[in-house]
Image (cartoon, rainbow, N blue to C red):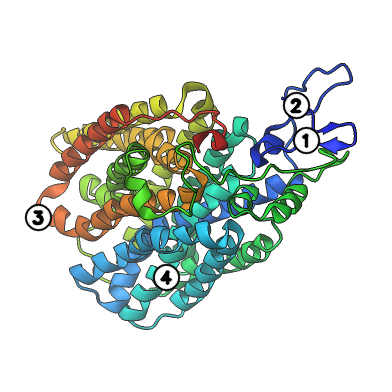
């Protein structure tokens, strides 16, 4: 590593070189680390908020759904559409809006997506018809879909390589925290306001926090990596100064190297396209980022959204038919408590992922997690044919193991890998496409689950999801690319 300043002349470096650089002691010894700046922590917090809102809104739908169905008198098809609307929005938003971060900048889309989320949330709470309800749930998902690639990139392109896995996963952990808050808030609102319209208050709790996040996102710099990729060197230097501002000032001078304009084959480097994701150079990364994530989301959202339904069906904790609104709300509260208890394991799992991702490696952790998910779902399947006194033990132990292992491995690691394995010029497109493909699984599960539960039963569905988890482990191994601790510029 060369020093930042030699005499009075700054040595030109890359963006990541400056971000990764650590100070020197007087005798030339390199310090073991350089503390994160206040701006780096601000970016991390504001990006984490997007994942929190996703967990809050998507998993809160599981609690709100029975009330929405009763208020709007929905058919099975319409119920499935409501369940899948926000997930379908995420599917579309991740590619349709996420790729715009490669063209207009990380910061602009970081702000725009949260404005869209807030506006749609206000309209959702005010919805008076089934059509507007579905439209604004889709709009909420559209914004959250854009956040998938954008939030990941704005974190990973602003922090040291050595901390990237830990901090990206820490931000992703807020999805699990949001899921827990979603079910907990749903329960508390039902307890305080046992009315069919209580679902509006559930979604409404996110409006003021969302407005605060919108304002905060105006006050962060754009990605230096992206600015350099566009040849905007002076702007990149200014953004890097804001990002690395600390007392005492370090580095004292920032001088960025000009980007390469010719690749290793002697061809001019141009803006990336979606077709490049399927080139011989990038197809391995595209498969690794997309297919395991798709297989994971089949289970994560199917189990996550319909945990209350499955618990009540197997345990028999509530009446099959609610005789009135009071019965409906009481049933919903019972299911919400069971779901919230299981959701705690999502948080424990992602905490373990944060601690292990850089030590064990992304690939090993994802494979281990997929296998653990399969074991958990298999235990839950055994509850179908177990004696009555063992049903609850098998079901809860299976779902708890699944919730823990999904966030130790595939649910968190697939998100991390998708934002790391692509070059800067197509990182937004690659991460967005991977998220969209993943959400195809989520949407299919959310929409079809009510019908599948009725036609095939819980046992058949759980066996199918066991197979999906095992397939996820196999695909991860065959297309593995380990990115732990690797400088993002080294992936160019």
Q: CA distance from mark 2 to mark 3?
A: 66 Å
In the image, is 99 to the left or to the right of 25? left
Of the two numbered discs 1 and 4 on the same chain, state the one appearing first in sequence. Answer: 1
Residue at left offset 59%, top offset 64%: 108
Whether tag 4 and tag 3 are in contact, CB under 8 A, the answer is no
- Residue at the disc numbered 1: 11
Residue at left offset 50%, top offset 66%: 192
Q: Look at the numbered disc 4 and give the secondary structure of its residue.
A: helix
Q: Which mark is residue 2?
A: 2
Which-is-in-front pick, marks 1 and 4? Answer: 1
Place of residue 122 in the rendered image (x, y in percent of width and height, measured from the top left) = 51, 75
Q: CA distance from mark 4 to mark 3?
A: 31 Å
Q: Look at the numbered disc 1 and give the secondary structure of its residue.
A: loop
- Residue at the disc numbered 3: 455
Whether tag 2 and tag 3 are in contact, CB under 8 A, the answer is no
In the image, is 57 to the left or to the right of 245? left
């Amino acid at each position: 590593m060369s020093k930042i300043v030699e005499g009075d002349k700054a040595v030109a470096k890359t963006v990541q070189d400056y971000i990764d650089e650590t100070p020197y002691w007087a005798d030339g010894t390199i310090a073991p680390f350089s503390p994160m700046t206040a701006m780096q922590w601000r970016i991390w917090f504001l990006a984490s908020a997007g994942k929190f809102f996703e967990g809050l809104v998507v998993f809160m739908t599981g609690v709100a759904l029975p009330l929405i169905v009763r208020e709007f008198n929905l058919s099975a098809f319409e119920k499935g559409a409501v369940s899948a609307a926000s997930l379908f929005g995420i599917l579309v938003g991740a590619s349709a809006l996420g790729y715009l971060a490669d063209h207009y900048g990380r910061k602009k889309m970081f702000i725009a997506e949260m404005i869209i989320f807030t506006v749609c949330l206000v309209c959702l709470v005010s919805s008076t018809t089934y059509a507007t309800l579905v439209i604004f749930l889709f709009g909420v998902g559209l914004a959250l879909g854009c956040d998938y690639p954008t939030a990941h990139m704005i974190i990973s392109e602003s922090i040291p390589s050595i901390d990237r896995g830990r901090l990206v996963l820490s931000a992703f952990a807020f999805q699990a925290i949001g899921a827990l808050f979603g079910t907990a808030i749903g329960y508390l609102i039902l307890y305080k306001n046992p009315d069919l319209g209580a679902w509006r208050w559930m979604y409404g709790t996110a409006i003021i926090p969302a407005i605060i996040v919108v304002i905060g996102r105006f006050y962060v710099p754009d990605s230096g990596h992206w600015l350099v990729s566009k040849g905007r060197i002076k702007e990149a230097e200014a953004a890097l100064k804001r990002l690395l501002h600390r007392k005492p000032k370090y580095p004292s001078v920032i001088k960025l190297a000009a980007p390469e304009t010719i690749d290793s084959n002697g061809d001019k480097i141009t803006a990336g396209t979606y077709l490049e994701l399927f080139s011989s150079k990038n197809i391995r990364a595209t498969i690794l980022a997309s297919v395991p994530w798709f297989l994971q989301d089949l289970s994560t959202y199917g189990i996550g959204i319909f945990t209350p339904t499955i618990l009540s069906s197997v345990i028999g904790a509530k009446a099959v038919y609610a005789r009135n609104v009071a019965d409906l709300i009481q049933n919903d509260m019972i299911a919400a408590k069971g779901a919230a208890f299981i959701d705690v394991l999502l948080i424990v799992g992602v905490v373990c992922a944060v601690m292990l991702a850089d030590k064990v490696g992304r690939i090993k952790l994802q494979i281990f997690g997929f296998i653990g998910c399969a074991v958990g779902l298999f235990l839950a399947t055994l509850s179908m044919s177990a004696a009555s006194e063992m049903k609850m033990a098998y079901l809860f132990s299976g779902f708890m193991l699944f919730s823990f292992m999904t966030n130790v491995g595939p649910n968190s690691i697939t998100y991390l890998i998708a934002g790391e394995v692509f070059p800067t010029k197509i990182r937004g497109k690659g991460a967005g496409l991977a998220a969209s493909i993943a959400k195809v699984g989520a949407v299919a599960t959310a929409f079809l689950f009510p019908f599948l539960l009725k036609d095939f039963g819980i046992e058949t569905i759980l066996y199918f999801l066991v197979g999906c988890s095992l397939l996820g482990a196999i695909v991860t191994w065959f297309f593995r690319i380990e990115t732990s601790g690797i400088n993002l510029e080294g992936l160019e």
